[in-house]
Image: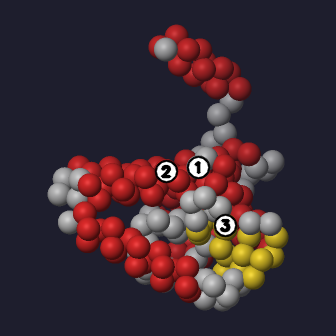
Amino acid sequence: GTAGLLLYAAVSYARLRRKVTDAVLVEPGVYETDAIVSPFVLGIVRPRVILPVDLTGEARALVLRHERAHIVRLDHAAKPAAFLLLTVHWFNPLAWLSFYLLTKDMEMSVDETVMQKADSDIRAEYSKSLLSLSLKQSGMLIPLAFGESNTKARVKNVLNFKKPSGWICVAAAVLIVAAA
């Protein structure tokens, strides 16, 4: 089971890298190609954001913020590490559930980070971007790359998002320190 999952990950990662070999550098760490339909972060040591060519305007800016937030949070390293744990515990349904929930939480948390750092209310535009990208999904399941997933739950999360007020953040910090 472990060997099968590792082989699957290696083959899918190699196919994906081969698919984006013609990607063109458009700005530091950001590449564009017409070979993909959904943006993602590729690489662990030197992560790169790979964007589809037809992504423009506000949607492109939001996607870049999202993918760069993954890089800042080191999600591009955490997800492969979690996948390695999954390969060792491939027989355990809880390991599969944990990997699924980790991926879902990473995406939702980054969505919230992007909205929290925005100067204005971007929920509507962000939701439109998520929906338009979900319609274009290629259906490829690549465990070591980030793609758009779990769209329905993410859109609900985005539309229900409210920036926490300052006193709530302070109270949470005090509770965390007290608990520690």
Tag 1 residue: 74
Q: Seen from this angle, which residue lies furthest left?
A: 91
Q: Which residue is mark 3?
A: 48
Is residue 99 at least partly visible in the picture?
Answer: no
Cβ–Cβ under 8 Å for marks 1 and 2:
yes
Question: Residue at horizontal 74%, vertical 70%?
Answer: 30
Q: CA distance from mark 1 to mark 2?
A: 6 Å
- First in sequence: mark 1 or mark 3? 3
The residue carrying pointer 3 sits among few (fewer than 14), some (14 to 19) or many (20 or more) residues within 10 Å by Cα, namely: many
- Residue 57, quarter of picture: bottom right
- Check the image and name the residue furthest to the top: 178
Picture layout, residue 180 above or below residue 105? above
Against 144, is 167 above or below? above
The answer to which quarter of the image holds residue 166 is top right
Residue at 52% x, 75% y: name it.
Answer: 134
Measured from the top left, where is residue 40 in percent x and y?
59, 69
- Amino acid type at mark 3: Arg
Q: Position of residue 110 (x, y in %)?
A: 59, 51
- Quadrant in which the N terminus is drawn: bottom left
Left or right of residue 100: residue 125: right
- Of callouts 2 and 3, which one flags the residue occurring earlier in the amino acid sequence? 3
Tell me what residue is drawn at x 80 percent, y 66 percent.
28
Q: Position of residue 117 (x, y in %)?
A: 74, 45
Residue bearing mark 2: 78
Q: CA distance from mark 1 to mark 3?
A: 12 Å
User: What secondary structure is marked by label 3?
Assistant: strand
Amino acid type shown at disc 1: Leu
Q: Alpha carbon of mark 2 to alpha carbon of mark 3: how far? A: 15 Å
